[in-house]
C-alpha cells in the first residue's frame, strides 16, 4: 500500500491536522504512517521517523517517553515544501499538456502545408483559357496605362 513517499504522507498528515486544528504527536504520526503501509520495526527506520518529525514538526526528542505524546503542528518549512511539491506536480502536468497541444498544432500545420502544396500544384497544372471578353478587358487596361 506504499504508493506515496513517506515524507509526503507525513507532510499531508500535518497539513490535515493543521486545517482541522488538532495537533500531531510522534505516536499519531507513526500510527498514521503504519496505517499507510510503512513499518518502523528497526532502529534505523525509527530514527528516520524521528528525523522527519524533528524537521517537519519540530518534535524534539527528550529523555523518557513523554515527548512522543507532546502536541505539535507542521512547521512553515514543512508546509512550504509540501506546497512546492504540489506546484512542481502541477507544472509538470501543465508542461505535458502544453507539449501535447504543440504536437497537435505542428501536425495540423504539416497537414495544412501538404493540402496547400497539393492545390497549388493542381492549379499550376491546369490549362488557362482566356475568352475574347477577358482579353479585350486586359487590352483596354493596358492601353489606358500607356496613354
Image (cartoon, rainbow, N blue to C red):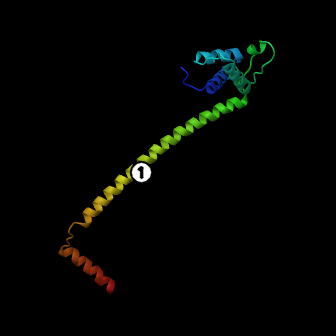
> In this rendering, is residue 51 above or below 70?
below
> In this rendering, is residue 114 above or below 39?
below
> Residue 136 occupies which quadrant of the picture?
bottom left
Q: Is residue 31 left or right of residue 126?
A: right
**Circle 1 SS class:** helix
Quadrant in the picture for the C terminus: bottom left
Whether residue 25 can be seen here: no
Residue 141 rendering spot, x and y as whole percentages: 29, 79
Residue at left offset 71%, top offset 26%: 56
Q: Is residue 131 left or right of residue 145?
A: left
Residue 59 rendering spot, x and y as whole percentages: 75, 21
> Residue 46 occupies which quadrant of the picture?
top right
Residue 36 rendering spot, x and y as whole percentages: 58, 18
Q: Which residue is mark 1?
A: 106
Whether residue 13 can be seen here: yes
What crowding class fits label 1: few (fewer than 14 Cα within 10 Å), some (14-19), or many (20 or more)?
few
Amino acid at each position: 500500500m506504499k504508493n506515496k513517499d513517506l515524507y509526503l504522507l507525513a507532510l499531508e498528515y500535518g497539513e490535515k491536522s493543521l486545517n482541522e486544528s488538532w495537533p500531531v504527536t510522534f505516536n499519531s504520526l507513526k500510527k498514521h504512517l503504519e496505517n499507510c503501509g510503512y513499518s518502523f520495526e528497526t532502529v534505523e527506520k525509527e530514527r528516520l521517523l524521528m528525523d522527519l518529525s524533528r524537521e517537519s514538526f519540530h518534535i524534539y526528542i527528550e529523555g523518557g517517553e513523554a515527548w512522543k505524546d507532546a502536541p505539535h503542528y507542521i512547521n512553515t518549512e514543512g508546509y512550504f515544501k509540501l506546497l512546492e511539491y504540489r506546484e512542481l506536480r502541477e507544472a509538470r502536468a501543465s508542461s505535458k499538456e502544453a507539449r501535447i497541444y504543440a504536437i497537435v498544432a505542428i501536425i495540423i500545420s504539416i497537414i495544412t502545408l501538404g493540402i496547400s502544396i497539393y492545390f497549388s500544384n493542381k492549379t499550376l497544372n491546369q490549362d488557362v483559357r482566356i475568352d475574347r471578353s477577358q482579353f479585350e478587358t486586359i487590352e483596354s487596361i493596358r492601353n489606358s496605362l500607356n496613354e
